[in-house]
Amino acid sequence: VQEGAPEMNADRPPGSSVKLTHPDRIYWPEDGVTKQGLVDYYTQVWPKIAPFIVARPLALLRCPDGIAEACFFQKHAWRGINKAVKLVPDPKDKGGEPLLTISDFDGLIALVQAGTLEIHPWGAPLAGLEKPDMLIFDLDPGPGVGWPEVIAAAKEVRARLEADEMAAFVKTSGGKGLHVVTPLSSKAGWAPAKEYAKAVADAMAADDPDRFISVATKAKRGGRIFVDYLRNARGATAVAPYSSRARAGAAVSMPVTWAELDQLASAAQYTVDNAPTRLASLDADPWEDFRAAAKPLPAGKKR
Ligand code: ATP
Ligand code: MN
Ligand code: MN
């Protein structure tokens, strides 16, 4: 992994030199989770979350006074930003504001200190902003869709990816749906990546129009799952694995194994509170092979 690597080799938890103010500030009132509670959570999951948030452009959902007060999505710097949050110019946005990124555990704690309750990285690293290194299929159930149907949709995406000899990993969103993620090794740019993701979504909608839809029109979603491939574009983001969500319940986006999926009760099953227990009880990281499983985009063909 990137710059976070030395700390991640340590068996002891990482420490941060970032000054935390108001550690008792309540971020999730119904759940009683405080700023310090979120720091403790990220201290435990740091080795797991680091590969997905270090050295990538980040969009942040900040709620400085917790989820009951104003929250805002932020892609650029703010006044008083901590120096552990780094600013990097976007070579394709000359004259625009720099992108935000972090390079270490201090950066993550600086985000929490600033009231960041959700972390949404790009699907490409700073080292290759034009070369996505993962694709995400964001399964968004419309009104009336049951949870078992969302699980079935994730399996359907997996089957289609595997038919193309691509790997498929699944995580809860911490909200309503599931995210199926495939690691990419290809040197392809954003256009073919998005084209491939769209082709998978379109094929699902064409083959099973009662279950799936591949256009974003909310009005048409009733009873169906939107296979949201639109995360796969330059500058688009999706919530990081292990990120908390600024929603009641203090859920997190949690990587799971395909075998576990049928046992899952909801996309919000894992939370800031119960995630550490889950992680401690696992024999193996469900996404252990994520990077090693990366494949190039399949060469253009009909699917
Ligand atoms: P759910 O399972 O409830 O759908 P989700 O994280 O998949 O949870 P979506 O609404 O499907 O939520 O995804 C929206 C995505 O769009 C987010 O993951 C985020 O990266 C991005 N996003 C969210 N809010 C904004 C915003 N204000 N501006 C730009 N992009 C946003
Ligand atoms: Mn979604
Ligand atoms: Mn979506």
Image (cartoon, rainbow, N blue to C red):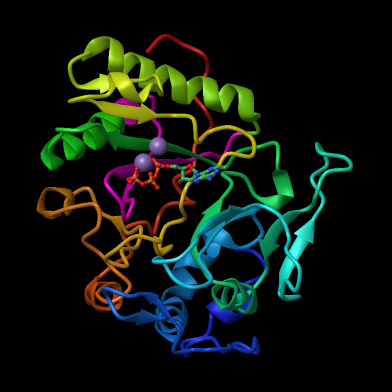
Q: In which quadrant of this rendering is ligand 3 seen?
A: top left
Q: Residue at x 34, y 28 (%)?
A: 227
**Quarter of the picture holding the C terminus:** top left
Q: Does residue 182 show up magenta in the picture?
A: yes
Q: Residue at x 61, y 63 (%)?
A: 54
Residue 180 falls in image quadrant: top left
Q: Position of residue 13 (x, y in %)?
A: 48, 87
Viewed as shown, does residue 64 lie left or right of 169?
right
**Quarter of the picture holding the N terminus:** bottom right
Q: Is any part of residue 68 visible from this angle? A: yes
Position of residue 162 relative to residue 95, above or below, is above
Residue 58 falls in image quadrant: bottom right
Question: For the magenta stretch, what is the residue range?
Answer: 160-186
Q: Position of residue 219 (x, y in %)?
A: 31, 21
Q: Is any part of residue 168 visible from this angle? A: no
Position of residue 238 relative to residue 232, above or below, is below
Position of residue 192 relative to residue 252, above or below, is above
